[in-house]
Image: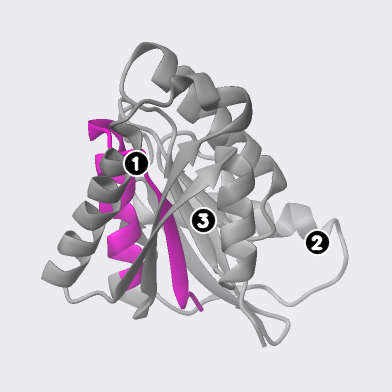
Amino acid sequence: MYQDVLIPTDGSDGTRQSITHGLTIADRFGATIHALSVVPEGPLGTLQNDAATPAAHRAVERIEAEATRDGVEAVTAVEQGVPHEVILEYADEHDVDMIVMGTQGRTGLDRVLVGSVTERVVRMADVPVVTVRLTDEIRITDAAEAERIARKTLAAEADAVEADEPTVIEEPHRTSASWIVPFETDGSTVHVHVDALSGDARIARCAE
């Protein structure tokens, strides 16, 4: 289902969990990791300094090194522009199947900016976006609870339309901060992603 997974990174310690999460997904599905760092321009251009571009290269090289260690194929890119716009354009141009992002940056203003970028990407992306919180505790620790939430989400989407009872085709599994619950329903396969921190769920349909 997932062949290309994009991990945007700002090189901060705060991206640690999103990197781990993205690599876990890529390893499980045999996907390629795309590590992307954006040197801000436009409204955020005042934050640039001479160290910004080298830091961006170090950030993606870090992901590439960890991917190589884990036996995951990786490609890297450093681009300039408005961060959320570059991320969305890259995802479209490279047929990315999933984006994995942290919800916070380093500290202070960076935390506001990274959170804002993630919010825009979640709202505007055409592919699933997995967001990884950095400080909250895992609330949903049981696979049965994750399956219950996933079934409720599928039922809500169906909106009382008659449909076959969805069948779990693989044991729900948790990767860092999300449960992935795979179902077969009405002859098609869907994966429901359940946020283990908030309980929010998102449906990702498999390509036919």
Locate residue 174: give its quadrant: bottom left
Residue reaching furthest to the top: 108
Helix, strand or loop at label 3? It is: strand
2 vs 1, front mark:
1
Q: Residue furthest right?
A: 161
Magenta highlight on residue 16: yes
> Which mark is drawn over residue 53?
1
Q: Amino acid at mark 2?
A: Ala
- Disc 3 marks a residue whose amino acid type is His
The residue shown at (48%, 18%) is 112
Q: Position of residue 87 (x, y in %)?
A: 56, 50
Tell me whether the residue at label 2 lies in contact with that at label 1, contact meaning CB atoms closer than 8 angstroms.
Answer: no
Residue denoted by label 2: 158
C-alpha separation, residue under disc 3 versus residue under disc 2:
17 Å
Using the image, determine if residue 133 lies above or below residue 77. above
Please say if 159 is above or below 200.
Answer: below
Comparing 46 with 135, the one in front is: 46
User: Which span of residues is magenta-colored?
Assistant: 1-26
Picture quadrant where residue 150 is located: bottom right
Q: Is residue 6 left or right of residue 126?
A: left
Return the residue at label 3. 193
Image color mode: one colour
Q: Of the two numbered discs 3 and 2 on the same chain, state the one appearing first in sequence.
A: 2
- Asked whether residue 171 is in view, the answer is no
Which circle's residue, 2 or 1, is located before the other in the chain? Answer: 1
